Image: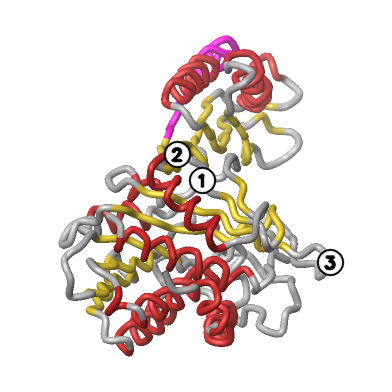
Amino acid sequence: MPDYLAEAQSLFEYTRHLRRDFHRHPELGFREVRTAGIVARELNELGLEVASGVAETGVVALLETGRPGPVVLLRFDMDALPIHEETGAEYASQTPGVMHACGHDGHTAIGLTVARLLHAHRHELAGTVKFVFQPAEEGLGGAQRMVSEGVLENPRPDVSLAAHLWNSQPVGWVGVTPGPAMSGAESFTIRLTGRGGHAAMPHTAIDPVLAAAHIITALQSVVSRNVHPLEAAVVSVTRVRSGETMNVIPSAAELMGTIRTFKPEVRARVLGRFEHLVENVAAALDCQAQVELDNMTLPVDNDPQVAARVQSVARTLLPEGELETEHRTMGSEDFAFMMQDVPGCFVFVGSANAEQGLNAPHHHPRFDFDERALPRAAGLLAAAAADFLLNP
Ligand code: NI
């Protein structure tokens, strides 16, 4: 097996140039027109078979080795976030209010680097690599949209791989976890209807603000009282809206938030308690409650065999002690929708550098990462893909 890590490092300038260009020109989900154009141009230049406009702005490309073998899907997300960048970096966003604050600029550059690496070795490989550059990962349903538009067919992948730069860990660290690694996510909206009135005569009104406050408090009991202490779950109320002024009891209130769980049985328990509490607390305070639950993503559940293979590739590539095999997070990733149908593995690649101040969390206006993580991710993904192609 060639030393894909060293080869990725020799392409560092190429990768960094692309990453910084994407970073300067971030685009929100389903609007990654410029980004997708560069992706298609680079892949076309390599002579890959490229399809653009998949799920609006997605790009899918096939690298055919010309020899029969498995199909390995590699997925990279391209979208930015509605955040105003505060890094002050020389390559900072030139679009006010839009920023690559999750590292997807890096992911896109990593994907194009992996394409170069595997293309250079195509004569030694067998099978097909399917490169999937996905739009709209940030809660907008890009992965589901790509699946519904047939990204998992013609040809059907045997294995799926993806990675995320991970700023909660330093550059030099890699996480490959068998089984559940990221939680599934629901979003919720609770609409409470009471009866408005004069704030000085509360007895003539039905106060939805009071019901909202009791519901927020009651929901804290779901994780602390209804979930096994050794299981993971999160219930967060993140938006509270009601009222206009100090002397009017409003007629309605609205709560929004998210629920995160790993296991179906924990999810069922949390959702059941959630609805029970909202309906009954609202009823006790004479309000009507309407609950809307939306399943945003499934848990990222790494196939144990695929994860074991990626771990063994990582061990041959990385110095002893750089690989962690038990890392889990309550964060979510819509790659789960591709892994649902195709056994896969989602790899975390440590990208923080505290000394250089490159350690702000994902989705923070000062998020930035140590670019030395880019070739590490590219080399590891290329080597893992090559391993599956040669030893199906
Ligand atoms: Ni992300």
Residue drawn 65% across the image and 26% down it? 216
Under tag 2, what secondary structure? loop
Residue at the spot of label 1: 332
Residue 98 shows up from this direction: no
Please, is residue 156 above or below residue 275 in the view? below
Q: Magenta region: which residues? A: 279-293
x%, y% of residue 284?
Answer: 57, 9
Tell whether 115 sits left or right of 235: left
- In the rendered view of the protein, which quadrant contains the C terminus? bottom left
Please, is residue 58 above or below residue 300 in the view? below
Q: Earlier in the sequence, mark 3 or mark 1?
A: 1
Circle 2: is it few (<14), some (14-19), or many (20+) Cα within 10 Å? many
Circle 1: is it few (<14), some (14-19), or many (20+) Cα within 10 Å? many
Magenta-span inclusion, residue 291: yes
Disc 3 C-beta below 8 A from ligand 1:
no
Residue 355 disc label: 3
Residue at the spot of label 2: 299
Disc 2 C-beta below 8 A from ligand 1:
no
- Tell me the kind of residue under disc 3: Glu
